[in-house]
Structure formats: C-alpha cells, structure tokens
Image (cartoon, rainbow, N blue to C red):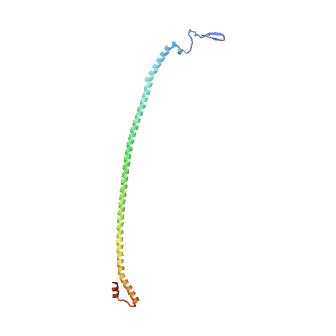
Amino acid sequence: MATEHHGTVESTEAPHGQESGGLPQLQFQHWGGQIVWLVLIFAVLYAVLSKALLPRVSGAIETRGAKIAGDIADARRLKDEAEVQARAAAAEVAEARAKAQKTAADAKAKASAEAAERQAKEEAVLAEKLAAAEGRIQVARDEAMGHVRTVASETAGAIVEKLTGKAASAAELKASLA
C-alpha cells in the first residue's frame, strides 16, 4: 500500500518485509504464543487462588457460618430459658396472688369475728344496763303505785270535805278506794 503526501509516495511496508496492519494481538501468527501465555497465567492464578486465597476465604466463611449457627443456637437456648423463667415467674405471681387473696380473706374473716365478738360484748353490757334500768323503773313504779293510794285517799278526802264540808273517815276513804 502506498500513500501520497504532498506529491511524494511513501511505502507503508515494514522494513523487514512485514506489513503493519493494526494490533499485533489480532494477527494470527501471534495467537499461538498468546494462548500459551494465557494458559500459563490462568494456571498460575488458578493454583495461587485455589491453594492460598480460596481456602482462607472458605475457612473464613465456614468460621462465620459456624459462629452464626452457634449464636443462633445460643439465642434459641436463651429464649427457651427465658420462656421457662417467664412461666415460672407467672406461676409464682399466681401463687403469690392466691396467697394474698387467702390472707386478705383470712384477715377479713378475723376482723369480722372480732367485730362480732365486740358487738356481742357490747350487746351484753347494754342488756345488763337495760335490765338494771328496767329494775329501777319497776321499783320506782311500785313505789309510785304505793303512793298513788295515799295520794288518792288524800285527794278523795279533800274533795269530800270541800263538797260536804265534813272530813271523811279513813275507813270510809279506804272502802271507797277498794
């Protein structure tokens, strides 16, 4: 191939008799060496990665997986323990509530019994006072009734004297009152 520059013709052929036509990687005569180097570099990289780096990465992944599995197992175990403790605490709370209700019922019954006992004592004291008062009333009534005859006799004598002008005898007054 020849190109023309300002009136001169230059040859594009290489000085060694080769044609320059682009990148040497795309020329067929270089492909054999390139494939050998490609296989060699791939094998070296594969060997380095599979023997040195990938075991470390897989070991780290396995270690992390084992740690995560252990943490999950611990979390489940702790959750189960917490549930057991929560059930035990709920049972203790229910038992304490039942004891508190029983204690309150016992205290209420005891207070009611004490109040009933105090009330019975007070009623007995009041009954005694009432009986004594009734006795005093009976004595006073009997005494008053005893005086009623005397008062009636005196009143009847005074009335008879005022009406008749003469005093009635005690026998007459006694007979009239009977």
Farthest right residue? 6
Question: In the shown orientation, is residue 53 left or right of residue 103?
Answer: right
Give coordinates of residue 55: x percent, y percent: 43, 26
Residue depicted at 37% across the width and 53% down the height: 101
Give coordinates of residue 59: x percent, y percent: 42, 28
Give coordinates of residue 65: x percent, y percent: 42, 31
Q: Is residue 54 above or below residue 168?
A: above
Residue depicted at 63% across the width and 9% down the height: 9
Query: 120 and 175: which one is in front?
Result: 175
Can residue 158 be seen from the camera position used here? no
Give coordinates of residue 169: x percent, y percent: 35, 89
Residue depicted at 42% across the width and 33% down the height: 68
Q: How many marks?
A: 0
Farthest top residue? 17
Q: Is residue 73 above or below residue 45?
A: below
Query: 7 and 81: which one is in front?
Result: 7
Residue 163 location, quadrant:
bottom left
Q: Is residue 54 above or below residue 142?
A: above
Q: Is residue 134 above or below residue 31?
A: below
Residue 119 location, quadrant:
bottom left
Quadrant location of the C terminus? bottom left
Can residue 121 be seen from the camera position used here? yes
Query: 174 and 107: which one is in front?
Result: 174
Quadrant location of the N terminus? top right
Residue 106 location, quadrant:
bottom left
